[in-house]
Image (cartoon, helix red, strand yellow):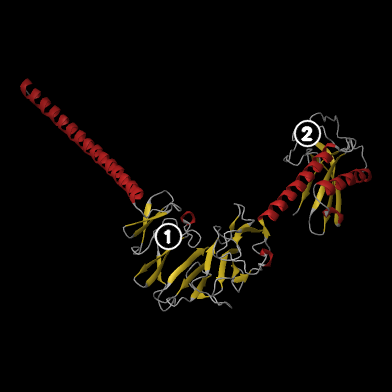
Amino acid sequence: MSKKIKNEKAQSKEQKVKGKSSKWIIVVLLIIIVILICIICNFIYEKRQEEALKNTKYYSEVDKSFYLQDGKLFIFDIIGNPVQVPGDFSQMTVADYEEENHQSNPKIGNVYFYYKVDDKIYLVMSNNTNFNEWTIKELTSEYMGIPSGSAIKCIRISGNYGYIFYVDSEGAGKVLKSTTEGDYWQEVGTDFTLNDNCTLKFLNKFGMTFDGFLTVPSEDGEECDLYRVDNTSEATFVKIDLSALGDSNKNFGYYSMPTYLDDSGMAITMYAGESKDDTNLTQFVSTDDGATWKTMTEYQNQKAEEAEREDELKNRYDQMAENLDQSVFLTDFENYNVDSDEVKISEEKAKQIAEKGFQESAARIAGEGIRDTEEESIEIREVSPNNYFTRKHNEGDDVYTNIKRKAYVVTKKNNMGNGVMVYVDVTTGLIIGGAAFGD
């Protein structure tokens, strides 16, 4: 083969390699371009969505978990993406979903809304945080029984329980209740008349035994009864005695419903006046779900007295810990260094020493439970000392694991299964710790 032919073949091979390399470069460039286009498009889309949220006049300033735009309702999933809720929301506004009357919790997938189409009303629900499955029920159907033209005053579904308060075109009010997460509903029977002046509102706490309150004003609006919504009661609405509020015609319904006083859910508060025109309102507080009421001044005085008593108990607790008899109780754990585990204390003596520990525990720590002794035992085992008897009220449990001692563990237990253990060092006879157990 001539040299010329060999050169031509080499050149041809080189050109083919270059051609393949060029094709791969072009493919990679095209992929990069496509990715860049996708990123830019996604950025533009997100910016437009953001601007749409800012510009829509229906955007909820109270609950940022949903918004209305162009007759469509959107909620945000767990990663913040908007998801459209199925249904025609063109007749709805954010005001239709006030927090007290309508509470939806996307964080746990408990999401529901209602919407109107002419005179028909629909309930749409989702029970998962992906919001990819929805159930729509026509509330005005013959099965549900809400008449066409009715106004929804309140709707709430929380766990198994759900309530719908509506008023028909004649002004008559009805309440439907569900105990199946909103799947099935039935009318709540009452011995009082519901009307358009009634207010049913729920407190912003999920899973409470009682959920909210219902006001039932008289026809002239001069008097008003208050009922508690009780999930566990067959009657559903439990009337609250308002005699503690003073005159029987205290009119609270025109001003405010009870709300939680703080985040603890332990106290509720409301304002009341002598009439619907009264501007001199008194604030009342209840700590037993509305069974009894105090004025805010009385409540604050009670809390101040309780705080003062608590401070006295704390000071007494600390003083007793500081005054422990060091011939009986070990108080210096850092310098406790005993050479042997020789048993120098008899079992009977250990019980006598432990009795001082039980008395100290009953007086300062675990109450009087050990008096009803049903069972008493004693055994020797290795323990680490602790600060059961020496700790202050604001101190946690400390176990001195660097120290190992043989001790008599004397245990007393009452007939409720509650009890106290006292550790008595077998060598020194000092009480080196203990523990309480049970409720």
Disc 1 versus disc 2: nearer the observer = 1
Could you say which quadrant of the image residue 139 lies in? bottom left
Do the residues bearing badges 1 and 2 touch, measured as CB atoms within 8 Å? no
Q: Tell me the quarter of the image containing the N terminus.
A: top left
Q: Can you identify the residue that label 1 sits on?
A: 95
Residue 37 % position (x, y): 25, 41
* Type of amino acid under label 1: Ala
At x 31% / y 58%, what residue is drawn?
A: 70
Question: SS of the residue at dot 2?
Answer: loop
At x 56% / y 71%, what residue is drawn?
A: 216
Crowd around label 2: few <14 · some 14–19 · many ≥20 (10 Å): some
* Type of amino acid under label 2: Ile
Residue 161: in sight, yes or no?
A: no
Q: Tell which circle, 1 or 2, labels the residue nearer the N-terminal end.
A: 1
In the figure, is residue 182 to the left or right of 84? right
Question: SS of the residue at dot 1?
Answer: helix
Residue 10: in sight, yes or no?
A: yes
* Residue 203 to residue 5: above or below: below
Residue 115 % position (x, y): 39, 66
Residue 298 % position (x, y): 70, 55
Q: Nearer the viewer, residue 437 or 261?
A: 261
Q: Can you identify the residue that label 2 sits on?
A: 403
